[in-house]
Image (cartoon, grey):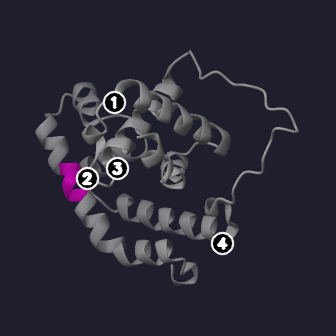
Amino acid sequence: MLELLAKKHNVWLNMVLSFGCDYQTAQDIVQNMYLRMHKYIKDEQRIMYNTEEVNRFFVYVTLKNMWKTYNTSAARYDVFEIREDDATEAPEVDMFNKEMDTAFETLLARISDEMRSWHRYDRILSEKYFKSDYSLRDIATGSGISLTSIFNTIKNNKKILKKKFREDWEDFKNGDYDKI
């Protein structure tokens, strides 16, 4: 099972980096995910999408939960000192490209501008959901609004954003930063 997971190491690493953590922490979380999977998943078919591919969503949820636990717990992961002669260079991660960062910031600014034009109710719920680590259930509990209402609002707002920014997102993923 570890061999199958390790084949997609860069995918898992980029998932964790997309949560907003630094490179070294992302490496630690991915390595701890390997250990957790090895410890708790005895039947590897349990995490397979088809017979030959690892279920990315299962791994994504595991990594997201580990990231949230890392951020909220007082007990951080153990950090081991790496001697200079043991260190290997970190692989190039495309996310630190200045042009890409600028394009991403532009895209986020456009999305924020769009969200500011929404009705107050839609805007506040979307900002709570997208810009924080609150779950739909947490928002419902804290606001007194029904979970169904919040779910439908977020779902509709996601549709609006996907429809309006699909081309920009595709340009961003394809590296056409000048089109954004």
- Is tag 1's residue or tag 4's residue first in the polypeptide sequence? 1
Q: Is residue 16 placed above or below 161 in the rendered structure?
A: above
Disc 3 versus disc 4: nearer the observer? 3
Which residue does the image show at 26% across and 41% down from the upper left? Answer: 45
- Is tag 3's residue or tag 1's residue first in the polypeptide sequence? 1
- 26 part of magenta stretch: no
Residue placed under numbered mark 2 in the picture: 51
Residue placed under numbered mark 3 in the picture: 54
Q: Horizontal and vertical percent for residue 134? A: 36, 34
Which residue does the image show at 67% across and 66% down from the upper left? Answer: 97
Residue placed under numbered mark 1 in the picture: 41
Disc 2 versus disc 1: nearer the observer? 2
- Is tag 2's residue or tag 4's residue first in the polypeptide sequence? 2
The answer to which quarter of the image holds residue 128 is top left
- For marks 3 and 1, give the CA distance: 13 Å
Q: How crowded is mark 1: few (under 14 residues within 10 Å), some or many (20 or more)?
A: few
- Is tag 2's residue or tag 1's residue first in the polypeptide sequence? 1
Disc 2 versus disc 4: nearer the observer? 2
The answer to which quarter of the image holds residue 158 is bottom left
Residue placed under numbered mark 4 in the picture: 99
Contact between marks 2 and 1 (CB within 8 A): the answer is: no
Q: Horizontal and vertical percent for residue 77? A: 59, 23
Q: What element carries label 4?
A: helix
Q: How crowded is mark 2: few (under 14 residues within 10 Å), some or many (20 or more)?
A: few
- Which residue type does callout 2 highlight? Thr
Q: Horizontal and vertical percent for residue 161? A: 31, 65
- Which residue type does callout 3 highlight? Val
- Which residue type does callout 1 highlight? Ile
Q: Is residue 55 placed above or below 84 in the rendered structure?
A: below
Which residue does the image show at 61% across and 60% down from the upper left? Answer: 95
